[in-house]
Image (cartoon, rainbow, N blue to C red):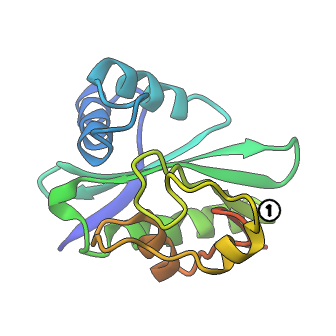
């Protein structure tokens, strides 16, 4: 699939609308993003400084995917939030390209860490809907993606991001 990755511009209303549409399509069961109004608020928040907002765009101008990053912990740490690829374009390398792009930007800006949170409200990993107690370490050691080609854990592991004692990993980029 042929696409380029660029900044999402605050004045590009068409791209902002399409990006919000990608978020809704990618997370139809996510409580905060299942409606266009909420998704638009998330997109607009992401393009406000000091946020970083990048989109994968087809040559036709259609937005295929989106990644945002915000500085957290008053330090040199970015949280990837969110990462979304339109379902029709998933499994085409767009998500991995967006992650690689944000890693380069973070490194160029002197950031040391990317932090990735993973919401499991739709139970797409073996930890979703699981009581971790007793024996949380045993359950974390047995974490695996449920049989779904769109499982976030599977994507994250393919992008080189693995759980580190819980369903998140801090990744050094600097």
Which quadrant: the C terminus? bottom right
To which quarter of the image does residue 56 belong? bottom left
Q: Where does residue 53 sit, x and y in percent of width and height?
A: 50, 44
Q: Is residue 165 visible?
A: no
Residue at x-position 37% and y-position 52%: 84
Of the 4 image quadrants, the one containing the N terminus is bottom left
Using a 10 Å C-alpha cutoff, classify the residue at mark 1 as few (fewer than 14 neighbours), some (14 to 19) or many (20 or more). Answer: few
- 111 vs 159, nearest the viewer: 159
**Residue 22 appears in view:** yes
Name the residue tied to disc 1: 110
- Name the residue located 77 percent from the left edge and 64 percent from the top edge: 113
- Residues 9 and 78: in front is 78
Mark 1: secondary structure = loop
| Horizontal and vertical percent position of residue 141 | 67, 80
Measured as percent of width and height from the top left, residue 54 is found at: 45, 50
* Left or right relative to 1: residue 155: right
Residue 61 horizontal side relative to residue 77, left or right: left
């Amino acid at each position: 699939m042929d696409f380029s990755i660029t900044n999402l511009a605050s004045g590009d209303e068409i791209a902002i609308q399409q990006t919000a549409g990608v978020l809704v399509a990618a997370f139809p069961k996510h409580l905060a993003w299942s409606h266009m109004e909420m998704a638009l608020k998330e997109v607009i928040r992401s393009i406000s400084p000091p946020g970083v907002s990048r989109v994968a765009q087809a040559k036709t101008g259609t937005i295929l995917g989106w990644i945002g990053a915000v500085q957290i912990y008053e330090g040199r740490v970015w949280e990837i939030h969110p990462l979304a690829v339109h379902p029709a374009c998933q499994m085409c390398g767009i998500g991995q390209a967006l992650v690689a792009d944000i890693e380069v930007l973070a490194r160029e800006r002197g950031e040391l860490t990317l932090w990735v949170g993973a919401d499991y409200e739709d139970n797409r990993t073996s930890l979703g809907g699981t009581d971790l107690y007793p024996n949380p370490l045993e359950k974390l050691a047995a974490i695996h993606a449920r049989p779904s080609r769109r499982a976030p854990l599977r994507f994250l592991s393919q992008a080189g991001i693995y759980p580190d004692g819980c369903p998140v990993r801090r990744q050094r980029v600097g």
